[in-house]
Amino acid sequence: GAGAWQGHLRVVLGQVPLGLTAADGMVATAEVSGLDGASGVITVPFAVQAGSVTMLGTDEDPLMELYLVPPSLNCSGTCKAVVTIYPLRLPAKSVRFDAAFFRYPAARVRSFNPATGPEQGGSTVQLVVEEYSGERTRAAALLPNMLDARVAGGGAYALFACGARNASVPATVSASSFIASLAAGTSWLDVSFQTPPAPCVEASVSLWVRRTAGGAVERVPLQAPLKYTFLGSVLGAVSPASGMIFPGSGGVHLTLVLENILASSSLALSVTLHAGPSGGAGEACTLHTATFYPTARQVVLSVSTPELPLSLAGTLNISVSGATALPLMAPWTYLAPPPVAWDVE
């Protein structure tokens, strides 16, 4: 047996009563013990798979074959069951037999990094997934598993789900580069994919495989859920946070740090000082250098302010355009010089 959501149980009944046919309808129930969170024996109905009842054998030794679909059985180990099958027309002609149902082990994610990234997407996420083969596994039962993504015609996908808003991206799967002492039938796989533009702030991530070329894309069960958080890009630091601009000084040198940015030297950046929240056109700063740090998802800018009139002294807004769809802003304080003290003799 395999659990209701994952398989079926093939049953062949011998010495079928004379005149009994598939059209008589079959009913199956099971007395199950070992269910998670349940004590004692629970009676549950089993569905007879539609169209599965066929007559076999000969007139002298008639047989009936059918497939039973178990209900959702929560077996952490193995559930033991006594199954009873009988035809609706002849309920006294029942057959009973013992069965066992077990849960196929779900794939286990050993590492998932990073679990956060810029909201515009494009970050590389890497996983190490532990998958299983051999007896009593999803691979043996021909059910969706990560090993199937490596066969000819197969493929893998990562789905970022946010309720009705979802985004799917292709994933690559290969034998893991990690060295580990693994039990027989256990494999570690490297899975990587690029994040999509954020469908929401926190997305549930699931893994899907296509086991044959042109086949359906099916979800691979995981032992624990995965979450990915999309972070908004920010102008995280302005150093120094304030300064005085003296005539002829050429402005004040500032270091700006942009956080949660997909660092790319192709970004066309500009920096502007504004006198208020909207600030109008503002005063352009001189951009000296832009250093990109892809791993840290940072861009560090070296800029100089323009010389500004004293009438603008106070809290200004410094904005960076070109890194994201909207300018990134942070406050900067333009300090007025101290008043001149006159000593009059």
Image (tube, rainbow, N blue to C red):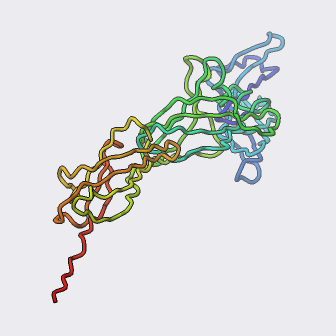
Q: Quadrant of residue 185?
A: top right
* Residue projecting furthest to the front: 345
Give the tally of numbered discs.
Answer: 0
Q: Position of residue 50 (x, y in %)?
A: 61, 24
- 254 sits left or right of 106 in the view: left
**Closer-to-camera residue (16/149):** 149
Query: In the rendering, at what x and y percent does residue 209 appear?
Result: 59, 28
- Residue 234 in view, yes or no: yes
Image side of residue 271 versus residue 13, left or right: left
Q: Residue furthest bottom?
A: 345
Q: On the rendered image, what quadrant is the N terminus found in?
A: top right
Up-down relation of residue 244 to residue 128 (above or below): below
Image position, residue 325 (x, y; %):
32, 42
Q: Is residue 62 above or below residue 67?
A: above
Residue 97 spot, x, y in % from top left: 81, 33
Residue at horizontal 25 percent and vertical 61 percent from the top: 316
Q: Dividing the picture into quarters, in which one does residue 276 lie?
A: bottom left
Quarter of the picture holding the C terminus: bottom left
Apparent side of residue 201 relative to residue 251 in the rendered image (left or right): right
| Picture residue at 75% right of the left edge, 43% below the top | 32
- Is residue 88 something one can see in this rendering? no
Q: Report the front residue among 67 and 61.
A: 67
Q: Residue at x 59, y 44 (%)?
A: 113
Nearest the viewer among 205 and 188 is: 188
Query: Which of 266/163 is in front?
Result: 266
